[in-house]
Amino acid sequence: MLRLISRPSAVNAGFAAARSFAPCPLCSLRNRRFAPRFVRVFSSASDTNAILQKQQHGNEDSSKSSSVRSGLYLVATPIGNLEDITLRAIRILKFADIILSEDTRHSRKLLQYYGIKTPLISYHKFNESERESSILQRLRQGEIIALISDAGTPCISDPGMELAKVCVNENIPVIPIPGPSALVCALSASGLSTDEFKFVGFLPKHAGSRRERLNVSAVETATQIFFVPPHKLHQFLNEASLIFGESRSCVIAREMTKVHEEFWRGTLGEANKIYSTQQLKGEITLLIEGKTNSVNNVPSDDQLELELKELISKGHSLSMAVKLVVEGTSAKRKHVYALALRLFGNQVEPMDDSAQES
């Protein structure tokens, strides 16, 4: 008769050996060698089989037709940490015939990290128009084309918007592959209101146009989100402090998901003083809280006239001044328009019918 003898030490040794051959998947991501293995383990069975079939047999046509349809794929990529990418994004990048990349040198690091060998073609704001016809031709022929930017979601302050428009007009499928986005990442952790927000992006280079855009943002109640180059931060804070007011709360999100990630929170006035002498590095997303309006606090005529005069002195047209005062206060449009007529006579452009309704 066989006797089963329990040997805890042997069992424990077996578990220890198993652990040595099966490291924690999350920990293994820190090592580049385990990244492709992590993808295979945690993708669905059908996805895994399709990827393995492509790698082993090199016959992409049959696997593509059954798993990925042709079209333009807008693939979101990490904004810093290479682990912030979806399994679906990796699969699409592997299956694509070509990948359109804003900077091929930058994107190649991501592809090498995940063992993706799909050909890269440069596609940026300086060659969008000349690339368009050849890309459309390939799409019409049924190819799978992925579009990525240097970081985040394509078409959001990055190349691709015009190409997506043309594809939509020609009934070529445009498929979003969601993922990282700097503006959503910054907003979610900002501590400011997320009920309503407006993404402004990069401001115009021309000083007059830039200040006019800030004037529009300053009177809106929604949280305002800007992309600011590090060398333009001091200029932005100086202008925003004057237009929004120094007491307005702001958040400076820098190097998100990277080693030196930083969220600075305070007022525009404080930020202007602190960063007037400091030169930050890295990608910056800057958020400013929306203007709070009291419905019952109707400004006096003197206050309204003062605001109108101030806006005119800053170079706004009279009709724009009326619009900004109305948006920034609880005053009725007709009343502000009447004040403007009294102050400036016939210089104010006639209001349209929709404006007169309020």
Image: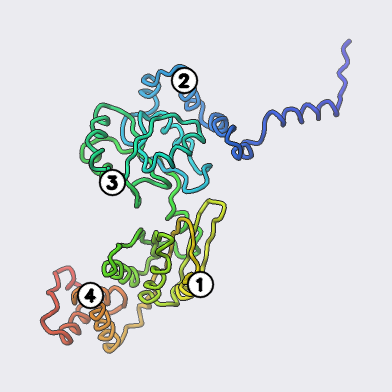
Q: Which residue is the site of mark 2?
A: 53
Q: Which mark is residue 126?
A: 3
Q: Residue furthest bottom?
A: 302
Q: Quadrant of residue 163?
A: top left
Circle 4: residue type: His
Q: The C terminus lies in which quarter of the figure?
A: bottom left
Name which residue lies at 42% across and 65% down.
233
Can you tell which of label 2 and label 3 is closer to the viewer?
Answer: 3
Q: Amino acid at mark 3?
A: Phe
Question: Label 1's element?
Answer: helix
Whichever of callouts 2 and 1 sits on the residue coming sooner in the sequence is 2
Dot placed on the residue nearer the N-terminal end, 4 or 3: 3
Looking at the rendered structure, the secondary structure element under dot 2 is: helix
Residue at mark 1:
274
Which type of secondary structure does the marked residue at label 4 adopt?
A: loop
The image position of residue 23, as x and y in percent, is 67, 33
Amino acid tagged 2:
Gln
